[in-house]
Image (spheres, grey):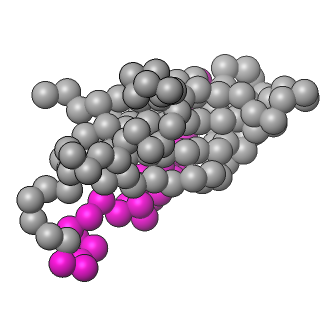
Amino acid sequence: MPEDKVPSTMPSRIADAGKALRHVFIRDFMVECLIGVYENEKRSPQRVRINLDLAVDEGAHPIIDDIRNVVSYETMANGILAIANEGHVNLVESFAERIADMCFDDKRVDLVRVRIEKLDILKNAGSVGVEIERSRKV
């Protein structure tokens, strides 16, 4: 498959040795939050699965085995939890945008892909949701 035809859901497209980009990710991060437009969704927390992919500029300097020199997935996970705990949000799209914005607080992050899945919505589906991809605005 030609590279320009590779689906954007392929995480391998984020890391790029030629551009010195590292791929940092969180898979199947589970949170409970108040999300949805219906009254019952505004009162009862729902299970949500989040997948996060980041393209991170490696920079010109070596890592030197120090956590301060990398984008920490723990920091990103804590940020997701903080956003989930801020209170009710109507749309999974809005939740995804807030997560993407939080990721860009770290200036090394060049591209963010966020997938949000509500797990207990449709009886005949494993999940429903949205995936967004945002790049840093120059």
Kindly give the residue lying farthest to the bottom in the view shown. 65
Q: Which is nearer the eye, 101 or 125?
A: 125
Residue 44 horizontal side relative to residue 87, left or right? right
Q: Is residue 19 above or below residue 96?
A: below
Quadrant for the C terminus, please. top left
Residue 27 x %, y %: 57, 53
Kindly give the residue lying farthest to the right in the view shown.
Answer: 123
Quadrant in the rendering for residue 36 = top right
Side (left or right) of 37 relative to 6: right
Name the residue rendered at 43%, 64% in the picture: 74
| Residue 34 appears in the picture as rendered | yes
Query: What is the x, y in percent for residue 48?
Result: 67, 42
Q: Confirm whether the magenta stretch covers residue 86.
A: yes
Q: Magenta span covers which residues?
A: 64-90
- The front one of 37 and 96 is 96
Q: Position of residue 34 (x, y in %)?
A: 64, 37
At 40% across and 39% down in the image, what residue appears?
Answer: 13
Against 127, residue 60 (above or below) is: below
Residue furthest left in the image: 60
Question: Which image quadrant for residue 120?
Answer: top right
Picture coordinates of residue 99, whole percent (x, y): 42, 39
Query: In the image, what residue occupies the spot 41% across and 60% down?
Result: 73
